[in-house]
Image (spheres, helix red, strand yellow):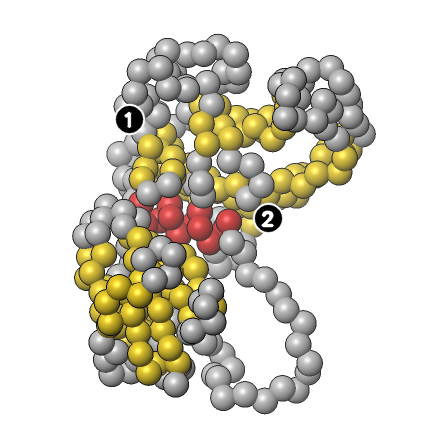
Amino acid sequence: MAPLIHQEIRLYKIIKRIDFINVVDKKETLAKEGIYYAFPFNINKGEFKLDVPGAILRPQTDQLPGTCRDWYSFQHWLNVSNSDYGLVFSSRETELVSLGDINTGKWLEELSLTNTNFFIYIMNNYWNTNFRPSQGGRLTFHFSLLTYSGKFDVLRSTRLGWGYSAPLVPVILKKNQKGILPLKKFTFCQVDKPNVMVMAIKQAEDKKGYIIRLHEFSGEESLFEIKFPFLKISRAWQTNIIEENIDSLKVGGNNTITLPIKGWGIETIRIIPV
């Protein structure tokens, strides 16, 4: 059913990371099918943790009775580790996973794991409504993993997961352009706390300045500073999620703004350049 299955494995000289690029050229069929990529790992007494919106989920431990245990979804990363070592896994195209086994249709009331294998669910045609009766074509799936020594670290997992999920986008420019920015490195903005991350930078919907959205991802309330080294700011505001101004913010020296953020919180600010 798949004339071509190709896998490319990338190793980096200066980055501790392994990337997998999987290409499947699949024929369509009306027969019911589910397709997975298996990731078998042997992590003694390992515990799974999944990145979900605004929190970290420990399967089974953090679940209410009756909630789904056959499969889970994660946003940017999956971690499995014990107190001595572990790994972080990230996927770009598909974030549905079965833990320990392929559990489709079991409707598990309890997830009792005896191993640390996981299965990434890439496609199926099980359902009779709202989905195509067959799936096929030339499809590409990107995965990345990082192994480490020591206990689980949310900063490590988040940096890999978010970074891999949002790769750099190349842009073609005219040659020999002159500019005022440094040639070797350039940072549009800097945040001084490692547990606070810039999620998005965009033009404001009302065209009045720019919107920067930040997220605290370790559960620790923090006071952070965001700095714009190459941008002069005339005014700044704290806004709500729909970009309505709430409070005026002081712009300090070197175009810095200081703001508190709650654990797992999201803060949005508006800046008006000179």
> What residue would you read off at disc 2?
10
- What's the residue at 76%, 35% (across, down)? 137
Give the secondary structure at mark 2.
Answer: strand
- Left/right of residue 186 with respect to residue 57 in the rendered view: right
**Image quadrant assignment for residue 247:** bottom left
- Left/right of residue 150 with respect to residue 159 in the rendered view: left
Crowding at dot 1, Cα within 10 Å, few <14 / some 14-19 / many 20+, comes out as few
- What's the residue at 42%, 70% (across, down)? 210
Q: Tell me the kind of residue under disc 2.
A: Arg
Q: Tell me the kind of residue under disc 1.
A: Asp
Q: Considering only vertical position in the picture, is 53 above or below 135? A: below
> What residue would you read off at disc 1?
62
**Image quadrant assignment for residue 49:** top left
- What's the residue at 46%, 76% (across, down)? 185
Tag 2 or tag 1, which sits nearer the N-term? 2
Relative image position of residue 3 (x, y in whole percent): 80, 29
Answer yes or no: is residue 101 visible. Answer: yes
Crowding at dot 2, Cα within 10 Å, few <14 / some 14-19 / many 20+, comes out as few
